[in-house]
Amino acid sequence: MTAPASRAAGGAERIDYRIRWQGSDVHPGAHRSRVAGGGDVFRGVVPLGPGRDARRIDLRASLADPWGRPWVREFRQHSRVPVLLLADLSRSMRFAGRCDRLAVCADFARALAPAAFRNGDPFGFVGCDREPRRELLVAPAVSRQAGETVARRLEAVRAEDPHRAAAGSADGLARAARWLPQRRSLVFLLSDLYLDDALLERTLRSLAPHQVVLVLLADSAEREPPARWGLVRLADLESGRERLVLLRPGLARQMAEQQAARIAAATRLARRHGASLLVAEDGLDTKAITRQLLQPRGRA
């Protein structure tokens, strides 16, 4: 059964998530782990030794030991897992059609960070254009205010000149892994995916140690032109270059087909690298995203 969506600070719906592996962090948390501790998942019986709880003596195993050693029951504790938001901040992410992509990124941080805080998970943020931007970095920490911190920094990005040189590229995504924790983490990669296949391939390969959720921020204005007939000035979202185009019904269909093909190609590439892909079109539907994240493996 899917858990109902909960509300984050400020009244926004919270995005809940599920970790699909056993963690190894020694700090207690909300997720299954391989670490021995004070949990309730039985791990086995082991000889009593340093760091083991003598109160959990197992009489049957102790009496059966031919050398008379005392044995104790060992349990697995629940552990915390770092949760990271990795955002594409290239020029195309400044596009605002039926939604503002950077505003959606801020909403995503506001919805995800409270869920991480409730689980006791460190939450962090890395934003990239040509390079990972150090001034926007939020180091992973268990913090009630982490989502608002990220949202404020993204508001500052929205106020920047969209034509600045570095903003035209998302190459920094492929170099962002160095800013992530070394231990396995849950990483949400937010992008409009106007990336060449080689860059997306390098990025997903660099994130292979982690569980990756690729979130495509789509806008229906990209597949539905402003008119079916007539002259219109269209701009390339990454380069910013404009050209005059004669719109016609065939071109409208072509734009919709190209958008569908882009999503299909990204889905195949994500699956090849063990990542999942979610599509958020025209804003953030936290309930739909939570339902997909909580689905059993193979049904997302």
Image: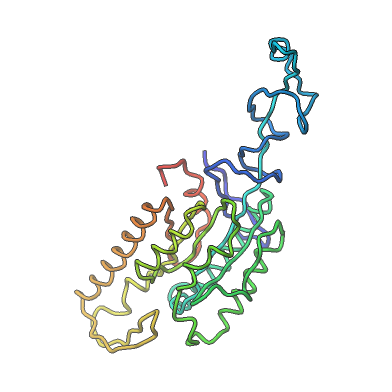
Whether residue 64 sits left or right of residue 157 in the image: it is right
Residue at 62% over, 54% down: 82
Residue lying furthest right = 55
x, y percent for residue 151: 62, 70
x, y percent for residue 155: 60, 76
Residue at 59% over, 74% down: 154
Q: Height in image: 164 above or below 253?
A: below
x, y percent for residue 120: 69, 50
Q: Nearer the viewer, residue 169 or 100?
A: 169
Q: Height in image: 28 above or below 52?
A: below
Whether residue 169 sits left or right of residue 46 in the image: it is left
Residue 137 location, quadrant: bottom right
Q: Nearer the viewer, residue 123 or 107?
A: 123
Q: Nearer the viewer, residue 225 or 265?
A: 265
Total numbered labels placed on residues in the image:
0
Residue at 68% over, 24% down: 46
Q: Height in image: 180 above or below 40?
A: below
Whether residue 30 sits left or right of residue 191 in the image: it is right
x, y percent for residue 252: 25, 74
Observer able to see residue 13:
no
Residue 160 location, quadrant: bottom right
Residue lying furthest front = 67
Q: Height in image: 211 above or below 1?
A: below
Observer able to see residue 270:
yes
